[in-house]
Image (cartoon, coloured by chain):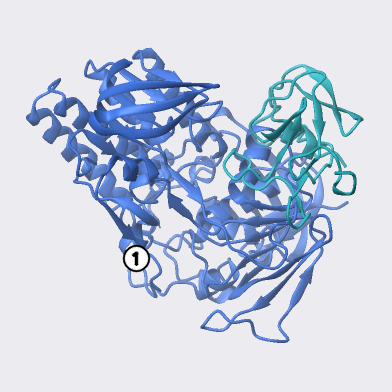
Amino acid sequence: MSRRIAEHPILGVQEKGEKVTFLCDGEILEGYEGEPIAAALRAAGIMKHRYTKKEHTPRGIFCAIGRCTDCVMIVDGKPNIRTCVTPLKQGMKVQTQYGVSPKPFEKQ
Amino acid sequence: MKRYDLIVVGAGPSGLSAAIEGAKRGLQVVVFDENEKPGGQLFKQIHKFFGSKEHKAKIRGFVIGEQLLKEASELGVKVVLNATVTGLYMDKELVVKIADTIYHYKGDAILIATGAAENMVTFEGWTLPGVIGAGAAQTMMNLHGVKPGNRILMLGSGNVGLVVSFQLLQCGCEVAALVDAAPRVGGYGVHAAKVARCGVPFYLSHTIVKAEGEECVTGVTIAEVDKKFQFIPGTEKHFDVDTICLAVGLSPMSQLLKIAGCEMEDNPKRGGQVPICNEYGETSIKGIFVAGDVSGVEEASSAMIEGRIAGIAAAQYLGYIGIEELEEKFEENKAALEGLRQGMFAPENRGKLIERTEEGIPVSMNLLTKGYIAEDEIERYPGVTHRAGIHPVMECSQNIPCNPCQDACPRHCIQIGSHITSLPVVDESAQCVGCGLCVAACSGQAIFLVQEDYEPGYGTVTIPYEFLPLPQKGEKGYGLDRSGQRVCEAQVMEVKTAKTFDHTNLLTIRVPVDMVGKARFYRKIF
């Protein structure tokens, strides 16, 4: 089931940017240019953004306004990018963050 | 270093209102906001506001946001976005991070309108992906058009928890339950009632034991708590959900004021650490003002008025206007503010159990514990009457500052009077024509049109309806009672939409005559 709201009873059909594709852990996903990366991920059903350094436990969207940093990921090679406030662009490379690395812990 | 007459931090309802009032009086004003878009939380608020005309009642939050932005831009207010103010120092010097660069600004006057941040509670599994803040849910669905989850449990029965639950239902999510550790619903009864009639069960005196799931939320367990908020063994209840939404209050984001050296106090009634300020919002440091949630958590309507007052006071502080103008404008705005701070939900009543309305009518206890007014309670309210022909039934049972229904009726059937918190009364001498303007005007969606003598054995109920798909005329379904239980078969007789209704559609359903006092929602047969 799609997570996108096709038409909202109050807001109608929401304006979106151009449809773009981006990579998440090597998988090609679709989203809209300018929407937060986190919104595109949630729409694609992706819940986990990172694993913590010490306990290796998963984290996802929590505040969605750039305050809590739970949703940080590696974006175009740069770690600790708050995906909830970073606009999506065509061809972006998004990776799950393990600690601060793109490599799963067993490979670190 | 660039200088401005007035630097406003935060482009939400209070910051923009202050900027507008300052600019109107000739001040050169800049507003910094850390977000990509201005408007603060207004653009996430899609319900109609309460209050009276001067408080922009009946207008949806995001529309108010658009109005404020337009007014500010017409007055030449500069709004700088993606600009995080990281420090406020001596002589009103501000450090602002814009993109990757740090800038310094100097304001002759400063207004801090940074708002509030969401509170959180911890429980086993609270860090799992799928546990989100209510604000996050609003941001995802109302700004970005993405459902935060498919099946959600809401923790918190204050206005945020209630309003966001309804918004989740509106965008097609399922709300499995609304839970609060408090023994009574904290927000407006009308907000609770519109969630309850959609079939969402309320669990007061309950809280979350744990969020379940290995990698993300797959379920939740709640349990009843005693008076000391300790779990009562054996009362656990499980729900399959993919999302847990937390709406457990807000705390002022007052850090900048602390950095600046303003005198602060810890005031639980205001939500936490707040600056000590005078009636104009001026802090202990001359020329540094505050407005909105940062000086005490309330809501957007009062934040806008506080912003206006502080903006005018800043103009006076800088010598752009005399003290007379400030005092005159202050009196007007103070009256508007006092209007909003009346009734059962006035700041001084926070946490108190109020057992009777101002009219002396017992408050519905079922509303406070289950989210809806019970059958044996509803008849006690003055808006609930029986008569021949079509007429409004107003299930408005709490004294809240709100009166759009009174102005909505072209035939003057509805009276609240000069006291804005009074319960609406039906004027028996005026003749209702069934136009439905009152139904659409009620921000609490608590007005229904009832006709008991529609045809032999059947009556009609007209309900406010803000969901998609919109039912079709002739369609058959069920009438749901105030608790969301199916009580009868119902047929859609009419669906009215009009620009003046502002997306509140009027659905007229035909139900058996003994159900006209019970059926308050409609659901199609699938």
Q: Quadrant of residue B110?
A: top left
Chain label for disc 1: B
Residue A73 placement (x, y as % from top left): 74, 37
Which amino acid type is marked by label 1? Asn
Task: Give the residue at the far front of this rendering.
Answer: A108
Chain identifier of the blue chain: B
Q: Is residue B495 shown left or right of residue B411?
A: right
Q: Is residue B231 above or below residue B87?
A: below
Residue B501 placement (x, y as % from top left): 55, 35
Chain identifier of the cyan chain: A
Front one among A78 and B340:
A78
Q: Quadrant of residue B67?
A: top left
Viewer can see residue B460: yes
Residue B253 placement (x, y as % from top left): 42, 46
Front one among B242 and B467:
B242
Q: Quadrant of the N terminus of chain B?
A: top left
Label 1 CA crowd tier, 10 Å (few <14, some 14–19, many 20+): some
Residue at point 32%, 42% (across, down): B257
Q: Is residue B384 shown left or right of residue B320?
A: right
Question: Could you say whether the residue bearing mark 1 is in a helix, strand or loop?
Answer: helix
Q: How many marks?
A: 1
Residue at point 49%, 46% (across, down): B442
Q: Is residue B379 above or below residue B242?
A: below
Q: Is residue A93 shown left or right of residue B103?
A: right
- What residue is pinned by disc 1? B349
Residue at point 82%, 37% (across, down): A102
Residue B378 placement (x, y as % from top left): 52, 69
Viewer can see residue B60: no
